[in-house]
Amino acid sequence: MSAAEPNVRLQPESGSRGGMTLVGDDKPLLSVRDLAVHFPVRGGFFGRAKGAVRAVDGVNFDVYPGETLALVGESGCGKTTTGRAVLRLVEATSGSITFDGVDVRTLGSEALRKLRRQMQIVFQDPFSSLNPRMTIASTVREGLVIHHLAEGAAADERVLRLLDEVGLRREYASRYPHELSGGQRQRVGIARALAVEPRFLVCDEPVSALDVSVQAQVINLLQDLQRDRGLAYLFIAHDLSVVEHIADRVAVMYLGKIVETAAAEVLYREPLMPYTQALLSAVPVPDPAAKKQRIVLQGDVPSPANPPSGCVFHPRCHHPARDAACARFVPLLEQKGELSASGQSERTTHLVACIKQPPTAISWEEQRAAGGTKAPVLYVPVLPTS
Amino acid sequence: MPQSQPLLELRNLRTTFSTDAGEARAVDGVSFDVGASETVGLVGESGCGKSVTALSILRLIQAPGRIESGSEIRLEGRDLMSLSEREMRDVRGNRVAMVWQEPLSALNPVFTVGDQIAEVARVHASASRADAKAKAIEMLRLVGIAAPEERADDYPHQLSGGMRQRVVIAMALVMSPSLLIADEPTTALDVTIQAQILELLRDVQQRMGMSVLLITHDLGVVAETASRVMVMYAGEVVEEAPVRDIFAAAHHPYTEGLLRAMPRVGAIRERLTVIPGSVPPPTAWPAGCRFRDRCPYSWERCEREHPPLYQIGAGHVSRCHLAVEPQRRAQPHVPLAAVGTADAGAQR
């Protein structure tokens, strides 16, 4: 109950925020490699597949024990599909998902059920993710019974302790979801996920349906639980201010691909992928005196059924060196910036997918040969801050 | 502050809904002005009464709701409460237009967007079919839609969320209204699209010289768009100030709490300050100060006496007794709603 808290996330070393050490195990709990989820587009009289929506298209990331990796991006970027594919709530088209050394994609249904004790999900909408006919107690209890963790009075006692833990009064146990506010329902969703004592939670926009004051309550709760239970979070969100607050590392998605990833502090201080820059600059700043250099992107996100060639962001890009080469080369995630020299581990490497932010494996000569007219140049606009 | 004659004047607006749980006083004595060519923000969380205020201005409250007698709504000096339904229909669309949160539900799925914009001109200006069509294309161009001649033939489902919201704004602007009410116009949109739409609203506001009443839960949106802001809580305006003052020197503990609870890019804190508890139901506003249980400064007076709007500074009013006993701010306590919860220690 004290305001002072141990800092479980990053322990910044004197002055330099690039040279930070991360606390915890150095072996990933979850490893995702080349993950792709394609949904067939059906058409014609017999509903034959005539194409595919590449919702997730070659995604790599690790989540370490006790840390929060945030997956951010706008609607349709594939962040939710990625989270669901990890839990096998949708089936991946290709790639590998390894959780604690177990290959998740090849598990049979019984083994998968066992594994799901370890990995749980908190959904965005606390109104539709709870069964309206089940009391709060039976909602939270269900997982305990399914996984044979507790029965009878012991289960009842555990349910009450879970309600305590998520900050719900015990009298709510016998109530139904419609009697609860949005914030209270989200606490029930968290209690339900925690009941089976998982080590890993996918939080899919857990606070975006909540009011600001309630949102802060739920974020604090998630942070307390992470500290107390050593949980790892894959935190899926579109709200960059919430993500900066809660995440250790951030991966930015655009059109099914990760386009930039770094430790949260680094990404917010020096975003290098032009899309990340635009995303950050678009966040309204609650300070009328703030200096603003707003990057307003033109147009909308293209359809993932028919993504642009080369860099998927190039039609909307504002990088001063954008040219014809951007439509020709598919940029790889490459290590960027000078920070890479100063004590970044593999885990905190700043990776950026852009052939115009140096250094890049696709040399200026190659770019010029492909029709490029502007040499790569480091571009870091000053972003609005509060 | 508004000049000589405000465009819109609300005085003691009270809107009530009869429910099984009793009378819900959704809007409970709201007064404010919107000046000509001014953008004013109306901020608050779910259930504070901000959207009902907007619907009341347009007299779109339906049974079991009603606007109580004694409420005054004046637009350009005209008493809207005394107008007939036919006259009121003329006000809507011609003088006051509205943009809704969810553009898809504001558009008819079986007509092209061009037809829907043209219909406004046909109904409100009795324009010919050809003139209305030309007007629709002109409006689509005004709201920044590329190739408006082609887009006019699209159906709403063929457009993205941001494009749909542009269409809704185009419809609202056909008759050059003097007041545009925008109710959470960007809440359903992605942040980069939100930036586009806010820029569009600023642009058309300046070009057409209209007033905008911007209703939102997002103080960031207000900071970037409005010149003045009203904060609503539990059916009342609890603070009103020029936008600069709200962010630099919020007076009401609720406003202060909202600003502290917001995570901000570029300002990492160990822990977010929360406002404990939740908004009381509108059927049972507590006597005295309605924020009392959630407030870290409340004392006996707050239970006894419903605070009036105290003058704090130029154009700055606050519904909080701290205005007359400012020394109380130096001694915050655990709010009643937080006693015995994990958030009790998280104040400040």
Image (spheres, rainbow, N blue to C red):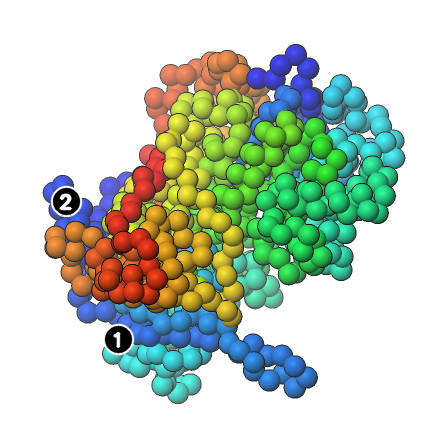
Which label's residue is closer to the chain start, 1 or 2? 2
Left or right of A153? Residue B175 is right
- Which tag is nearer the camera, tag 1 or tag 2? 2
Q: CA distance from mark 1 to mark 2?
A: 33 Å
Left or right of A17? Residue A153 is right
Answer whether residue A209 is visible to the viewer in this image. Answer: no
Left or right of B95? Residue B332 is left
Res B257 quadrant in image: top left
Provide the chain ID for the residue under circle 1.
A
On the image, numbered disc 2 is attached to which residue? A16
The residue that appears at 44% across and 75% down in the rendered structure is A37
The number of callouts visible is: 2
Amino acid bearing label 2: Ser
Answer whether residue A371 is visible to the viewer in this image. Answer: yes
The residue that appears at 24% across and 62% down in the rendered structure is A365
On the image, numbered disc 1 is attached to which residue? A100
